Image: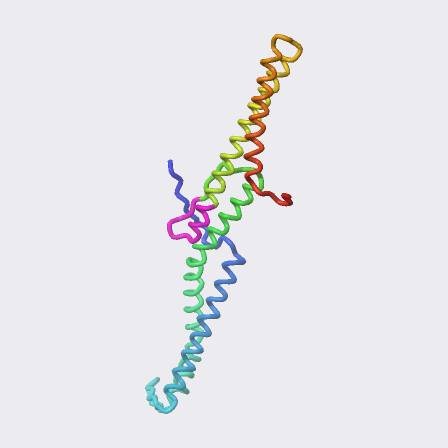
Amino acid sequence: MKRTWRRRNYFIKKELQGRYIFSFFILVILGGILFTFIFSLLSANTLTIVYEDYNLRIGQTPLVLLKEILSAGWIFIVTAGLSVVIISMFLTHRFAGPIYRFEKSVEEMIRGNFDFQIRLRKKDEGKELAGMMNQLISRLSSNFREMRDLTDAIELKIKEASESVGHIEQEKEASLELTEARDLTGRLRAILHAHKIKNDS
């Protein structure tokens, strides 16, 4: 049965997502201020008529606009703040989730567990990296499996050769067993030397 990966928690990496949510919020506020400033410059030489509470007021458009924005500022801040938090939480979830999954996968590999595959959701970012990591996990698993089989075979050959030592009629057979063990050791060495490791000379 195929497992479907659904994350119920949308706030996975709090520090990372919090940073982005705050940045988006500041960006929206700065965008609003910039829009107001540009609109004020473009409408500096115009007049606006405002009819409010049975009062008719005439004033320069930038000043009237600024007063209206300040009077309704808390509505803008609350609405924009909630909108930014919700939207940015859903957007950051698409890459915060995969980063969390990669971290957990690397922790598993550090512990020596290679019996898993990294699965991401359809809209998640980082599918290419997940594919590459899955290839690495598969290759390492295959190499470890082959090395296990080779060490078991070497141990068996050495055991058989040891049992044959001391019997003159079985010396030829012991020599053959040791030759096969040497060949298996060579294959194991080839697998090990195919990987570059730290401080490798």
Q: Quadrant of residue 191?
A: top right
Q: Which quarter of the image is occupied by the C terminus? A: top right
Q: Who's the residue at 41% across and 77% down the image?
A: 72
Q: Nearer the viewer, residue 58 or 115?
A: 115
How is this picture coloured? Answer: rainbow
Q: Nearer the viewer, residue 80 or 56?
A: 80
Residue 151 at x, y = what percent? Answer: 57, 27
Give the left or right position of residue 63, taking residue 184 as reference.
left
Residue 61 at x, y = what percent? Answer: 37, 87
Residue extending farthest to the front is: 172
Q: Who's the residue at 60% across and 15% down the image?
A: 174
Q: Is residue 125 magenta?
A: yes
In the image, residue 60 sits, relative to residue 131, either above or below, namely: below
Give the left or right position of residue 144, taking residue 88 as reference.
right
Q: Which quarter of the image is occupied by the N terminus? A: top left
Give the left or right position of residue 156, taking residue 1 as reference.
right
Residue 158 at x, y = what percent? Answer: 61, 20
How many numbered tags mark residues here?
A: 0
In the image, residue 94 sits, relative to residue 175, either above or below, namely: below
Residue 177 at x, y = what percent? Answer: 58, 18
Q: Who's the residue at 49% across and 40% down the image?
A: 137
Q: Quadrant of residue 194?
A: top right
Q: Where are the magenta residues, as a range?
A: 119-132
In the image, residue 18 sits, relative to residue 108, either above or below, namely: below
Q: Nearer the viewer, residue 142 or 119?
A: 142
Q: Is residue 118 magenta?
A: no
Q: Who's the residue at 41% across and 45% down the image?
A: 5
